[in-house]
Amino acid sequence: MSEEELKVYFTLIILMSLMQKPILQSYWTTDKSTETPYIRTVLSRNRFMSISRNLHFANNESLQPDDPLRKIDMITKALK
């Protein structure tokens, strides 16, 4: 995965939060009444799903089991 592709992925996440649809697959529909063609043109649904399944921000073996934010701890610390 390239840095550019990761930027596109996060841009789509933000865009999807602004135009909510009932199910994730709806963003890639070709139905003229509900389509959002921009999303289809920048990243395929299969690629988006693949990135979503495989993107990790932490090493599971080094996480504190009692920390509820353990999966995103590295990100939350960087934002402070």
Image: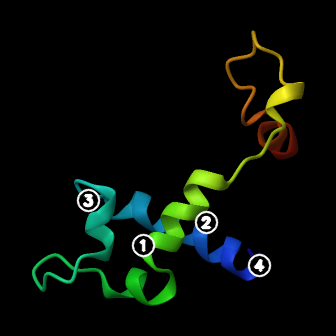
Q: Earlier in the sequence, mark 2 or mark 3?
A: 2
The residue that appears at 59% across and 70% down in the rendered structure is 9
- Pointer 4 with pointer 3, Cβ within 8 A: no
Q: Which kind of residue does numbered mark 1 sit on?
A: Arg
Along the viewing direction, whichever of 78 and 54 lies nearer the viewer: 54
Is residue 48 toward the left or the right of residue 28 in the image?
A: right
Residue under numbered circle 1: 45
- Pointer 1 with pointer 4, Cβ within 8 A: no
> Which mark, residue 10?
2
Q: Which kind of residue does numbered mark 2 sit on?
A: Phe
Q: Earlier in the sequence, mark 4 or mark 3?
A: 4
Q: Earlier in the sequence, mark 2 or mark 4?
A: 4
Q: How would you rate the neighbour count of disc 2 (Cα within 10 Å): few for under 14, some for 14-19, many for 20 or more?
A: few
Q: CA distance from mark 4 to mark 3?
A: 27 Å
Q: Which kind of residue does numbered mark 4 sit on?
A: Ser
Q: How would you rate the neighbour count of disc 4 (Cα within 10 Å): few for under 14, some for 14-19, many for 20 or more?
A: few
The residue that appears at 67% across and 18% down in the rendered structure is 68
Q: How would you rate the neighbour count of disc 3 (Cα within 10 Å): few for under 14, some for 14-19, many for 20 or more?
A: few
Q: How would you rate the neighbour count of disc 1 (Cα within 10 Å): few for under 14, some for 14-19, many for 20 or more?
A: some
Q: CA distance from mark 1 to mark 3?
A: 15 Å
Residue 12 coordinates in the image, percent (x, y) = 51, 70
Residue under numbered circle 4: 2
Residue 41 coordinates in the image, percent (x, y) = 43, 90
Circle nearer the viewer, 2 or 1: 1
Which element carries disc 2, helix, strand or loop? helix
Q: Which kind of residue does numbered mark 3 sit on?
A: Lys
Residue under numbered circle 3: 21
Using the image, determine if residue 27 lies above or below residue 38: above
